[in-house]
Amino acid sequence: MSASFRFHRFWGCLLCVPCVLCIVALAVLVNPRTAGALQELNYTEETFSTTYLVPYIPEFSKTPEGGLAWETLARTTEISYEEKNAEGMDIAGVRPDFPADVLALDGQEVLMQGYMFPLDAAEKQAQFLFGPFPATCPYHYHVGPAMVIEVSAAEPLPFVYDPVNLRGRLELVSRDDAFNVFYRLKEARLAE
């Protein structure tokens, strides 16, 4: 998969109106009171995914005993940047500002429950995205980068729609200007 295609699939539709509508529709389905709350909330996608969606994580993903909670990773804040690359082209993105308790997890083996977001159409996935909510769009995972992990599996894992428990070594990514990834889970494997 080309880096360009992968980037667009991962973050390419951040400003896509149908995708924003998917986020709002999901929130209204989860909680009908959302409709009224959204009228009063002047939100950005970051505000929506980190402030509003975090309380709903336990309804979708449970923290396994001894596992790492998504709420911990979601406390990482996004720092926006705009720069010129080597060719003089304007680039923009986000980089993480990890809190101290998240920094302490770098290189540690962690256990988490979440949903797979495939990056290709294969039955088994060697590399995929992992997050606290099921995918609602085939092009973009509708949460900010503080709630998405790029997973590299020890052995390709069969794709499933149900939540799965994964164990692997968590890597914090302080700078990934190509994909704006904050976290990677290395040598991931299914866990009970």
Image (spheres, rainbow, N blue to C red):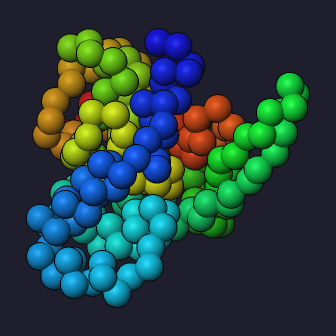
Q: Quadrant of residue 63?
A: bottom left
Residue 7 located left or right of residue 111: right
Q: Quadrant of residue 155?
A: top left
Residue 100 located left or right of residue 38: right
Residue 151 located left or right of residue 75: left
Number of numbered discs on residues = 0
- Residue 174 in the image: state x and y as whole percent: 70, 46
User: Which residue corresponds to the image point at 76% horizontal and 50% vertical from the top-left?
Assistant: 82
- Residue 27 in the image: state x and y as whole percent: 22, 66
- Residue 1 in the image: state x and y as whole percent: 47, 12
| Residue 65 appears in the figure | no
- Residue 142 in the image: state x and y as whole percent: 35, 50
| Residue 127 appears in the figure | yes
In terms of depth relative to the viewer, which is nearer, 6 or 168? 6
User: Which residue corresponds to the image point at 32% horizontal and 49% vertical from the top-left?
Assistant: 19
Tell me: residue 116, above or below residue 36: above
In terms of depth relative to the viewer, which is nearer, 13 or 31? 13
Q: Quadrant of residue 163?
A: top left
Name the residue at the front extreme: 17
User: Which residue corresponds to the image point at 57% horizontal and 62% vertical from the top-left?
Assistant: 76
Q: Quadrant of the C terminus?
A: top left
User: Which residue corresponds to the image point at 21% horizontal and 20% vertical from the top-left?
Assistant: 158
